[in-house]
Image: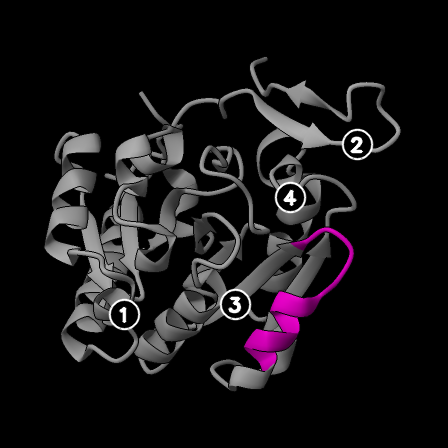
Amino acid sequence: MPDHTHSHTRALRLGVAGPVGTGKSSLIATICAALADDLQIAVITNDIYTDEDARFLRSAGVLAPERIRAVETGACPHTAIRDDVTENLLAAEDLEADFAPLDLVLIESGGDNLTATFSPALVDAQLFVLDVAGGGDVARKGGPGIGRADLLVVNKTDLAPHVGVDVAQMVADASDAREGRPVLGVSRTDAESIEALRDWVLGVLTSYRSGAHEPVDPGPMAPHFHADEEHPDGGYVHTHEH
């Protein structure tokens, strides 16, 4: 039988992944603002060499600045959320020790490719973020994050008329790719979509606290290419299958 005793002793850890520019930081700010009156929240951001995302969130004023911590991965962003999660685990534990009791720790991946996923050793649930500006067909391309994250967010739906994307079709394509797993179109200008996102987070938290929620591994990232000027081929193919 799974051991769920931890569900009553620590915060829910929710990972947020997705490609560069899809609005992960602003989505986290939206979640924080929507739940600030109900939950005690902290945030961890991941960047390769900077704390830019953490500074953005602090400037947004949705949480006390000291509740937002930056992890500088020093390597591919997905390495610190998939391969060696130690720094993020330590940051989460430090936040929980400093601000106990926390209800929710949001962990933002550095902007990465379509295959980035969190290790279930780090997060209890994860959402994957796409945006309409990336093209209406991107959801059909699939990948472990798109296919099997706990929630897929199609972000910035208010931009759809400006980029020629049919949001309903994009959401439908995403639902097909996810075999019925939840998909949510979100815009920070659409109160109804923010309420739906808030309800989803609260639902996962309720399930987690009851011991009913089990972390699901979306599966290893697909092999992908890393540019490297010093490599004779200009880069190398990297895999996360262990």
Magenta residues (range): 47-58
Please state, as top left, top right, bottom left or bottom right, where the N terminus lies in the image.
top left
Residue position for label 4: 77
Residue position for label 2: 228
Between disc 2 and disc 1, whose residue precedes?
A: 1
Between disc 4 and disc 2, whose residue precedes?
A: 4
Q: Residues within 10 Å of mark 4 (few under 14, many from 20)?
A: many
Between disc 1 and disc 3, whose residue precedes?
A: 3
Distance Cα–Cα, label 4 vs label 2: 15 Å
1 or 3: mark nearer the eye: 1
Residue 162 tag number: 1
Q: Residues within 10 Å of mark 1 (few under 14, many from 20)?
A: few
What element does badge 3 sit on?
A: strand
4 or 2: mark nearer the eye: 2
80 to the left or right of 127: right
What element does badge 4 sit on?
A: loop
Q: Residue at x 59, y 73 (%)?
A: 67
Residue 1 drawn in magenta: no
**Residue 150 seen:** no
Between disc 3 and disc 4, whose residue precedes?
A: 3
Residue position for label 3: 42
Between disc 1 and disc 4, whose residue precedes?
A: 4
Between disc 3 and disc 2, whose residue precedes?
A: 3
